[in-house]
Image (tube, grey):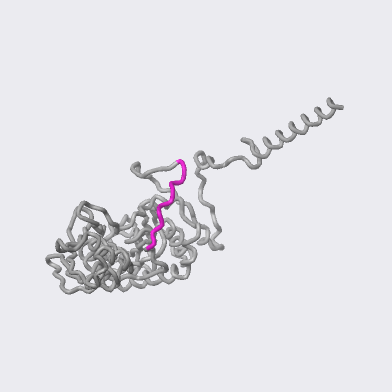
Amino acid sequence: MKAYIAVILMTAVSATLSACSYLTGNDGVFRDRQGDYLVSPVIPPMSIPDTLDSYTLDALYVVPDDVPVDKPFFMEAPAPRAMDTNVREGVVVQRFGDRRWIVIGAEPGQVWPRLRDYWSTAQIPLSAEDPIAAIMETAWLGEPGTRNKYQVRIEPGLHSGNSEIYVVQVGEAFVADVNAPIVWPTRSADLEIETRMLDDISLYLADRTDLYRASSVSLLAGSIEAESKAGIVRTASGDTLQLRIDFDRAWSQVSQSLGNAGVEITSSERDAATLLVNYSPVAEEDRPGFFGRLFGGNEEALLPVAITLRLEREEGYIAVVAEAGADVPVQIRDALIRAVHTNLI
């Protein structure tokens, strides 16, 4: 009897192992396919009859021709970055002088697939796209002789988790040969046409902001630079705000941020790159206990403190530093720098 049971158990185990091998082995139905893309062949694009619509058949995962060798590659997904509480929800069109761009509360890797959805929905063909540099170029649009072409660029925003979208337009008259690669200018040839395209994109994205907080992220576009353009660096003399933007925009952003924070600007000298402010740390930080202890509970601590903000041009960024008299603790100056950073848009 025992021998009979042993035979049955061995038969059952053998059948189970065979079934597992059949299902999950190298040739099984449910085999591990995670490395298949490494040996996948390149096949011709699908041919669609002229009588049928083909714009919805889009290459969702575009492989760049040449992957830069200096870009990091990961065998496993990198750990997520710390959450930035300054992420702006929704879509906002910012304007500075004749420059306009979209600020959206999503990372570049999240914006990339949604922007590609926009082109498909609008039935606008793309002539080139680079997910590493986060740049898309449309085909020539319109009637011959008056056609327009657009370059759309995604950049990290001032805060981690935000992105900026820029549009550059050129007309057919701008180029000598419409079939040759374009050397894109820094400004659009027609700002009115650029504005219409920018507004159209912003309206499309504004209707889909709920999707950005989901897990829909382009793995291919994951190499897009996501480091924010603004960050605080601790130095021996206190906190310094670094802005990776040009001076004109940095001056405007800092002035706007002070207004958003409710900090009074008593005087400003753009040529000297300085802003004199009256800063009330208790009101801004909303931490009367800390500053009360710092000043021994004296009501004089509630009075505004005169601090000078200086913008210094450094290689690759603008440094914003806070300067004050020796009687002003470094904690007060650091609190002002943090207030400016928090209220940047």
- Direction right: furthest residue: 1
The reply to whether residue 96 is visible in this rendering is no
Residue 341 relative to residue 199: left or right:
left
Query: In the picture, residue 297 is in which quadrant?
Result: bottom left
81 relative to 157, above or below:
above
Question: Of 143 and 270, which appears nearest the observer?
Answer: 270
Residue 339 relative to residue 276: left or right:
right
For the stretch drawn in magenta, the main secondary structure is: loop
183 relative to 285, above or below:
above
Magenta stretch, residue numbers: 75-85
Residue 269 image position (x, y, % from top left):
13, 69
Residue at (74%, 32%) from the top-left corner? 13
Question: Of 16 and 286, which appears nearest the observer?
Answer: 286
- Direction left: furthest residue: 272
Query: In the picture, residue 19 is in which quadrant?
Result: top right
Q: In which quarter of the image is the N terminus?
A: top right
Residue 100: say if magenta. no
Query: In the picture, residue 95 is in which quadrant?
Result: bottom left
Residue 302 image position (x, y, % from top left):
25, 72
Residue at (35%, 41%) from the top-left corner? 69
280 relative to 23, above or below:
below
Residue 81: say if magenta. yes
Residue 321 image position (x, y, % from top left):
20, 60
Residue at (54%, 54%) from the top-left corner? 47
Question: Of 139 and 121, which appears nearest the observer?
Answer: 121
Residue 45 image position (x, y, % from top left):
51, 51
- Direction top: furthest residue: 3
Residue 299 relative to residue 225: left or right:
left
